[in-house]
Amino acid sequence: MQNELIKIDLSVNALVEKKFINNLLEINSTTQKHGLVVTEIIAKEIAEAHNLALKENDRVDFSSDTVTRLVKAFSESYYITQETFSEIIGEIIDLFYFLKNEIDDVLSDDDMISEMLIVFNETCFGVIEVMQSKGVEKIIRKYNFGDTKIWDDYEKDRIKFGVDDVWHDYEKFEEKLEYGETWRE
């Protein structure tokens, strides 16, 4: 009896994953407008990232709606290329659920996606490592404490490092970090 339940559970999981992947493949008409293609391999990687993010953040999400909205929104970012597409989207999915927990779901999913996209593009210049630190901190402080001071700190750091655009001057930025300078803690 227990083996039969395990087989049923595995087949249900396989069907759910197949539907999830198919839903991601269906949004190619949107992503291709921005030069990004959701291949079956990328869709599987995104599905795996989604499952891991849910597990790590103790969240439950039975549909692919949130992820497809994230993929559609972030495909508009000119900082994401076909080569970085799957990895960045995977990180963004994890950050999405982490932020939902940290700010106690005060934002709707669509508002959270919009906020994340603005911070990713305008503050972090598409650098996922900056998004994972300064970007996340900015969103948490804004919605938990009404504090936007982090923007001022970020601008001071950009001036300190002499970097106008972190994405395009990333080598210059990394070089300065290698010699002992760090972002403001």
Image (spheres, rainbow, N blue to C red):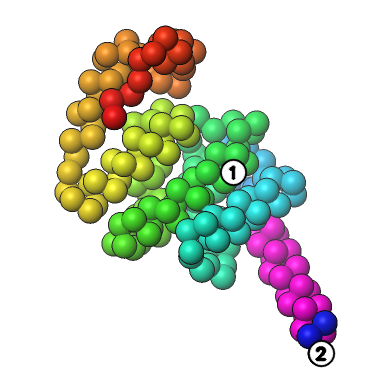
In this orientation, which residue lies closer to the viewer: 184 or 9? 184
2 on left or right of 27: right
Q: Quarter holding the N terminus? A: bottom right
Image-based side of 136 in relation to 153, left or right: right
Place of residue 102 in the rendered image (x, y in percent of width and height, measured from the top left): 34, 56
Residue 119: % across, % down: 35, 38
- Tag of residue 1: 2
Pointer 2 and pointer 1: residues touching (CB < 8 Å)? no
Q: Look at the magenta stretch and give its main secondary structure.
A: helix
Q: Quick one: label 2 or label 1, which is nearer the N terminus?
A: 2
| One can see residue 121 in this view | no
What percent of the width, then of the height, locates residue 180?
39, 13
Judging by the rendered image, the residue that carries numbered circle 1 is 31
Q: Report the residue at 61% width, 51% height from top.
A: 49
| Stretch in magenta | 4-26
> Taking 172 as reference, is 5 left or right?
right
- Would you say residue 174 is visible in this rendering? yes
Residue kind at label 2, given as amino acid type: Met
